[in-house]
Structures are given as C-alpha cells and as structure tokens.
Image (cartoon, rainbow, N blue to C red):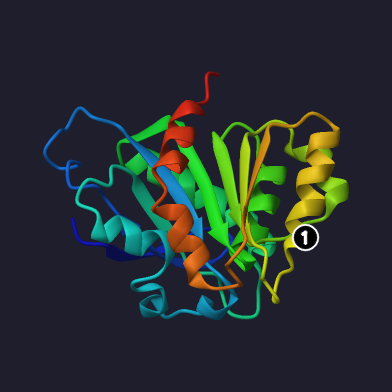
Amino acid sequence: MPTTNHLFKSDIQEMGYKLFLPNGYVGNKNEFFPLILFLHGIKRRGNDLSLLDGYGLMQIAEQDPGFNYIVITPQCPINTFWPENHLILVELVNRLIREYRVDQSRIYLTGFSMGGNGVWDLAAKTRGLFAAAVPIAGWYESNEAQNLTHIPIWVFHGEKDDVVPVSYSESMVNAIKRIDGDIKFTRYSDFDHSHNVMKETFTNPELYSWLEMNKKTD
C-alpha cells in the first residue's frame, strides 16, 4: 500500500507524520499487525513531510512487498528535539492503536542520530507501550540507565562515526550492562554517520527475528 501523509492535532501541539500499512492490511480484516515508530535525524525537522520521502525505515518498508509492519514516521518540529516531543509521540501511537489494527504486544521503537537520542529518551520515559527499542547512532545520559532496564534494547553504531561518536553508545550499553539490563550492541567497523547504518540495520533479517522474540505479555 502507498505511504500516506497525515497531520495529528492534539491538545499539546500539531505534528505531521507518514504512515505505511502492509500490503496485507486491507485484505485480512481480522489480522492485527505489529507497529514500528521510527524517529528521523536532525536534518529532517520542519513541517514539510516530503523531507521524509525515501528515508530510513519507511524506504525499506516501501521497497519490500513482504514488509509486514505498520510504520509511523512523525516529523519533529523545527528547532526542537525529540525529547521535547515525547508526550505527543505517546499520544500519536495511542491514536494509531485506536484507529488501526495494531497488535499491542508488538509495538517497537527505533530511530537514527537525533532519532536515536529520541529512542533512548522515549524508552526511558515510557512504560508498558513499547516491546523493544532500537537506537541507531544515538546518544543519551548514562545516568539514566536505571530507567532502561524494563525494555529489551539493541544498539547499532558505526565505529567511524565522526558526528555522534560510537563512545556515546558504548557508555549507554556499559551502564545498562552494569545493572543487568537486556541490551545488545552491534558495531559497524566500516560505517560513519551515514544512512548506510540505517540501511544495513533495517535490511537485516536478524533484527526482525529479534523484534518478534520481544512481545509484551502484560
């Protein structure tokens, strides 16, 4: 199915977003689908959804006829960062749950760069909504590790990243390991801070097998 553009209006603010529905969504009215919330990087902020065309997880979903996840890609308002928008992101996901056939045991969170920072932050501030989180080339405060033990996390980062150093992910991973959190870490030896990191991650079948292993049970 084609990706569609939408505008979400809440009591907090407005936020545009792109929505991808799997090819099988219309055909089977009784099937519920997993949902992935994807948070973009800093250069895609604003109120022009065309900046998100052919980008990140949405691009992978659109190119794969068998991609079986609902994908929502909101657009961060200009001059703000994802942590400032965490409340409207939760509202937006809850709206999708009400309006579409979302499997609430399989709602996942991922993002790149500034979006990776948003993943860490939203996972730390949210309980009971997301089944797993996948920050890519992101950063966060390691002293928040105690707020991230409730959710499985798989971190990805390029070792040649000169924009967001891989040490930022390392510090988070090590802090969570020290308190026995559920965390994995994949380092790409040949990648810098480029979209190749997203492509390599989002085309990896092992990622989706891991996501499917992590379902909410409560």
Residue 178, compared with residue 92, is above or below; it is above
The answer to whether residue 130 is seen in the rendering is no
Going 60% across and 72% down the picture, which residue do you hit?
193
Q: Give 185 or 52, whichever is nearer the viewer.
A: 185
Residue 79 picture location, percent across and down: 65, 80
Q: Quadrant of residue 111?
A: bottom right
- Circle 1 sits on which residue? 168
Number of marks present in the image shown: 1
Residue 119, compared with residue 151, is above or below; it is below
The answer to whether residue 66 is seen in the rendering is yes
Check the picture and name the quadrant holding the N terminus.
bottom left
Going 58% across and 66% down the picture, which residue do you hit?
190
Residue 119, compared with residue 138, is above or below; it is above
Q: Please give left or right for residue 102 compared with residue 86 in the image.
A: left
Check the picture and name the quadrant holding the C terminus.
top right
Residue 3 picture location, percent across and down: 26, 62
Q: Give 104 or 192, whichever is nearer the viewer.
A: 192
The type of residue carrying mark 1 is Tyr
- Crowding at label 1, few (<14), some or many (≥20) Cα neighbours within 10 Å? some
Going 36% across and 61% down the picture, which residue do you hit?
58
Residue 25 picture location, percent across and down: 20, 42
Going 54% across and 33% down the picture, which residue do you hit?
131
